[in-house]
Amino acid sequence: MQQNLPLFYTFNFYVFGMVAVVAAILFVTRKSPVAAAMWLVTTMFALAALFVMLDAQFIGAIQVLVYAGAIMVVFLFVIMLLNLGHPSEIADARGRGWKLVATAVGIALLAQIFALTRVHVEPRIAPGYLARQIEYTGVIAPVAGPLFNEYLLAFEVTSVLLLAAVVGAVVLGRRRSATDAS
């Protein structure tokens, strides 16, 4: 069973890679902003799965918590504030074919989880190495160091852009509601 492990990781890499690419394409091509936001969440989850497969569990968790969680809540809040989505456009997957595809993907993912619980995984690094590294630098230092040193300007510019987008959405929402009241 140990020999099939690289094949298992390769297969899952292609599965989650294809899910990310297809969801990103669907995100760009949707007319409904709410449906587009949901496809973006799917892309973020697929990317988090790829990070976990690369033994970057912290980055995968941050991907889910920050991007698929907090940022998408802000996006949906802005979409709902501007009232861009109509209820008839929200559900993109109404046909029976989409439901069958979703069921097949769900069964495949459950089968992979079941197969992973049956496989005995040998550690790829020396025993105790990771514990010594965590004691020495901590878990967050390899991520936080470059983020707040080399990439600090890009990090701050991104936060200012997100703030400007939210303020712009509030201004547009107030302007629309003021014209509706007149």
Image (cartoon, rainbow, N blue to C red):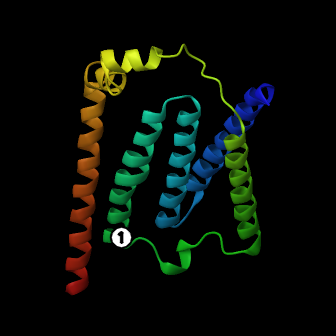
Residue 129: % across, % down: 46, 14
Asked whether, in this view, residue 68 is left or right of residue 154, the answer is: right
Q: How many marks?
A: 1
Residue in view at x 24 percent, y 34 percent: 156
Front residue of 152 and 139 = 139
Is residue 63 left or right of 138 when viewed as pictured? right
Residue beneath label 1, please? 80
Q: Amino acid at mark 1?
A: Met
Q: Is residue 70 above or below residue 139?
A: below
Quick one: quadrant of the N terminus? top right
Q: Quadrant of the C terminus?
A: bottom left
The residue nearer to you, when weighing 88 against 104, is 104
Name the residue located 40 percent from the left edge and 40 percent from the top edge: 62
Q: What percent of the width, then of the height, locates residue 174?
A: 21, 71
Q: Is residue 65 left or right of residue 172?
A: right
Is 94 situated above or below 12?
A: below
Quadrant hosting residue 118: top right
The residue nearer to you, when weighing 136 against 33, is 136
Image coordinates for residue 72, horizontal then vertical, percent: 40, 55
Dot 1 falls on a residue whose secondary structure is helix
State the residue at coordinates (61%, 51%): 23
Query: Which residue is at the front of the view, 164 or 11?
Result: 11
